[in-house]
Amino acid sequence: GCGGGLLSESLARLGATVTAVDPSIQLVQQAKTHAQLDPKTTSIDYRGGYTVEQLAQEHQNHQLSSSFEGYDVICLLEVVEHVTDVHSVLSSVRSLLKPNTGRLFVSTMNRTVKSNLLAIVGAEYIMGYLPPGTHDWNQFRSPAEIQQLMDEAGLEQVNVNGMVLTKPPLCGQWDWKLDPSDVDVNWIGTYKVKLEDRPQQS
Amino acid sequence: MSAAALTSRLRREWIKHAPSMSRYLTTTTDEFFDVAIVGGGAAGSCLANLLRKNLPDLRVALLEARENPPSQPPAERVPNPRSYALSPQSLKILGESVHSTLDDRLGYYDSMQVWQANSPSTLTFTSRDLDADPEKSTYLGACCEDQALVATLWEEIQAAEVTECLTDTRLKSVKCGDSTMLASAQTEDGSIIRASVLVGADGGNSWVRKAAGISRIGGEYEQHALTFTVSLTDPIMRRAFQRYLVDGGPLALLPTYSPKHAVVVWSTSPETLSEWKGACDEDLVHHLNSCLREGPQRVPSFMEDNMNQSWSAGGIFSNIAYGAERVLDAVHYGLAMASQHPNPTFLVPPTISGIASPKFTFPLSCFQATTYVKGRIALVADAAHTVHPMAGQGLNLGLADVRALVDSLEKAHSSGMDLSSFLHEYNSNRHRSVSVSLGGIHALQRLFRNQDTLLTHAKTFGLNVVQNVGPLRRQLAVAAAHGIAI
């Protein structure tokens, strides 16, 4: 879910070799154009009109002939609340993640009264930060629900943190903080391949 | 690899083995840099040096119009009057290695004594005003020659061999860029330099600012400044002096690294300046000494000032005026006597024995750019703002800009973000801070130009208050040292 490539570019500048996938062709085309501005971002492997399931399939097809061990980091940030089949996405991700050391980051919003008030009523209707209808509150997931889905897909939780705003948006600069105790609205979790579920190496 | 890239790479290798040569763009190229700095003066080269130290993986270019990089002035010569008054905070921003290289070329001062014509008050700032701890506050400021400072910075930059130093480079066009396009500058020989951030550090008449279409508010002062080095009969003992003369302009005497030499900075009307610039040395020395060695005076009587007015001839009004003046005198002297100031007595500056350098004049102005940031272009130091030299703030404000810009670049860089991501924060921080400083200094300039008697009483009172209200004086000293608003 790379979208316009904001995260992809940051990670590339910090030294990562990035493969970026998104179902939207148009967005990825814009991302590709933008990535040409900085020599450090020109080598990002952008795949527009591509899903993570297709990427998993591609690697499965090449499994015997390549030395690909899996990705060190996979990011699914602000994606699961927009996806209809979360289980399919997670299974594909599990097959792409490096066992033991690989880490999956998933961020989304919790399905609480507070998140409805802030993220939908507040952000979409009152402040107008996002167009109304961007988010469907019913698709928000709590950490516990995601943990359940992870478990079914062969992944286990490492930790979960809430992403909390320390200053109210109305007066001045936004400042995000990680807080393990407040997962009421935005939260981000870290996951890894379940130990007993290590894929067979041939 | 393209022919252009290969030529450029070969040239770079060649230059590496001939470090004394400056680099010339002899064939047209199109190069990308993370940061391109236009202007290799004090602020521009300080910025390049800080980026080299703090963000070493960034590709930085330093563009300078002069043909050769500045060289160190020879030792054993008279200090050059083209100097800056650097605060301890500025020397910290410049960095320890630069400070220690410059150390024996700095004219440190522990106190700055300010007084007026026709007024009994004296204001003395000391290094203790910056920090009560004598271990930490070893000086109030230091006078530093421009040539020595810039040469030292260039030496450090060139020795590290990571910054692209492009001398003899003049620009003919510039593009601000935005989120979808890089900033770019085209040189006179047709080469193009693209950058994530382009910095205008090219002085008060900044070409970058004009080419980017950034306007500024403010104006030229009616005053110009005259500066030259003088020799003294006695050492100046790490003290700086500034007197506001009858025509309003300050006359400042600043220490140099040579104890028996000082730099004079005299701000006054262009007519007065050309008169004295052409006068013989003896007369000039005599005039300077009579201005500087005269201590605080009684405020002239309002009555004497207004002898021509028919209603001041006598009667009740003159008695009231007389009474009022006595009350004001009592207030002034009373405050002075009740002082808790560590150095309350007026110190007579050393006698000037001769003029030791050529005389330089420069126009004075107070300008503030309407914005410091446009697209991917950022302005720093004099390109962004100019100020009257009376408070010695010019380069201090400039180096504070440099530090703030480096902070915003570091913030973006640490998260791998586009380097221009936080330029708006640099702008709002510095624009606001500098506006307040400029406002304050301009207000002082206007205040001291006016010699009206009532205003002189007000100024005397004000000076006394600052002198004797320790916390206020200390706050002003710290604000001046840090180039920030109070």
Image (cartoon, coloured by chain):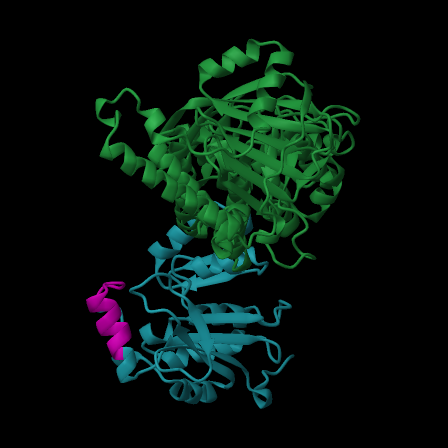
Chain colours: A cyan, B green
Visible residue check, residue B368: no
Q: Quadrant of residue B175?
A: top left
Is residue B260 shown in magenta? no
Query: Is residue A109 toward the left or the right of residue B53 in the image?
Result: left
Image quarter where the N terminus of chain B lies is: top right
Image coords of residue A142 (percent x, y): 37, 85
* Quarter of image, res B5: top right
Magenta-drawn stretch contains A126? yes
In this image, B44 relative to A150: left or right? right
| Number of marks present in the image shown | 0
Check the image and report above or below for B280 versus B365: above
Q: Residue visible at 54% across and 41% down?
A: B396
* Camera-nearest residue between B242 and B375: B242
Q: Is residue A171 above or below residue B155?
A: below
Between A164 and B173, the residue placed more toward the observer is A164
Residue situated in front as seen by the camera: B443 or A170: B443
Residue A181 vs A122, above or below: the answer is below
Q: Position of residue B17 (x, y in %)?
A: 78, 32
Q: Is residue B404 above or below residue B244?
A: below
What x and y, as percent, mark residue B82? 61, 26
Q: What residue sits 27% from the left and 63% below the top?
A: A129
Across and down, in percent, residue A132 comes to 21, 67
Q: Residue at x 52, y 35 (%)?
A: B296
User: Front-most of A133 and A115?
Assistant: A115
Range of the magenta residues?
A116-132
What's the residue at 48%, 74% (across, down)?
Answer: A105
**Residue lying furthest front:** B315
Left or right of B352: which side holds B178? left
| Helix, strand or loop for the magenta stretch, by majority | helix
Can residue A21 be seen?
yes
